[in-house]
Amino acid sequence: MRIDGIEIRHYRLPLDPPFNASWDPNPRRSHTCTLVRVTAGAYEGVGSGDSMLGFAGHEPLFIGQDPFAIERHVQLLDNLQFHYGRMWPLEVALWDLMGKISGQPLWKLLGGRSATVPLYASTGERRDTASRAASVKKLQEAGFRAVKIRFHAADPRDDLAVVRAAREAVGEAMAIMVDANQGWQMPWDSAPTWDFKTALWMADALAELDVYWLEEPLHRHDYRGLAALRKRSSVRIAGGEGNREFAELREYLRHGSLDVYQPDVVWSSGILRARQLASQVEAAGCIYSPHTWGDGLVLLANLHVVGGASRAPFVEFPYDPPAWTPARRDYILPEPVLAAGDGTITLSDKPGLGVEVDWQRLEPLRFGQGTIAY
């Protein structure tokens, strides 16, 4: 069986009211998704993520090839990424296709460790102390055993006050993570980021509040700074979501920079490299718990890698109602991905990622011509 078609489609869901992402100075008034569809005979694989700019014209590299030749495909996608940006949505589609051809869910193809994945509710907006404390309490009552709070205040003490209020609201029973959002910036964001002393001060303060991890307290390429912070801090240090090269992620391991490794399979590593990295991370006594922020397919792809290969105590579940809900996040799916009442999710035994995209239903939200090759 050979790959006989590749198609890229773009969709946009208007957001009213807008979503005010903590990492973006500009309100988000729409949620844009790019879907990659790969076919082989009667089988279809789907992935999502970045817009795949620059891919047009390179379809012949894959058309006519064995979909299971994943090592070859990943090498070419890495070549393309060097020239044009992230191409991993196509690899996700290829894995989905392989799962559907073989009749196996992706999490089993990747190791089959467990279909049940423990989640943490990952908030996305910055809120005042009272509002965030109330929302974290509601998440706890909904069954989540862990929550992540976003930082990005001009004065870090304002962010710290939010965590203190959240801890007071939920007591000791709920794990709290913090995302400092210092590892990368949006193209239009020129605000200064933390230096080492600020990161160390914050890590010490968060330790007093029993915070489980501090995410991206320094620039993503500051391997030595992160390693020094990790040695001096009693709070776990997390990062890696924005490091595009596999060599960068291995630099974290070489320097001992992180306790928690977070490469997203469509942002950073691809699925094959994610599986390899998860093994190396756990062999080093660390945690592999990927970034999953995006749409429902992005979330599922990362959850399947965890289900196949990771013992992470918690994995990101983007959820911050009313601004960020499964309905908004997962509009490209036939139905949203929901957490169970105990703060976990059980992955499907259906082949591949376990979903079939309803292309006709999405057509009113489609824009642009996309790329089609048969």
Image: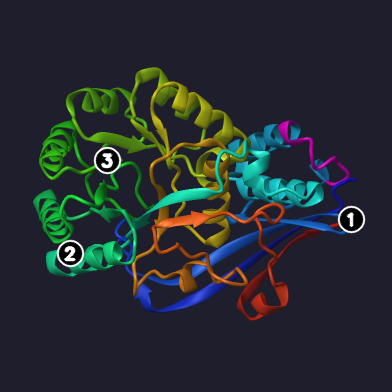
Callout 1 touching callout 3 (CB < 8 Å) = no
* Pointer 2 or 3: first along the chain: 2
Q: Residues within 10 Å of mark 2 (few under 14, many from 20)?
A: many
Say what amino acid the circle numbered 1 marks: Gly
Residue located at (66% from left, 58% from top): 354
Relative side of 200 to 146, left or right: left
Callout 2 touching callout 3 (CB < 8 Å) = no
Tell me the chief SS of the magenta region: loop
Relative side of 91 to 145, left or right: right
Q: Which mark is residue 213?
A: 3
Q: Nearer the viewer, residue 267 or 369?
A: 267
Residue located at (46% from left, 36% from top): 311
Q: Is residue 185 magenta?
A: no
Give the magenta part as a residue range: 63-71
Callout 1 secondary element = loop
Q: Nearer the viewer, residue 338 or 181?
A: 338
The image shows residue 309 at horizontal and vertical percentages of: 55, 36
Q: Quadrant of residue 62?
A: top right
User: Real-space Cα distance between discs 2 and 3?
Assistant: 18 Å
Name the residue tied to disc 2. Answer: 133
Q: Which mark is residue 335?
A: none
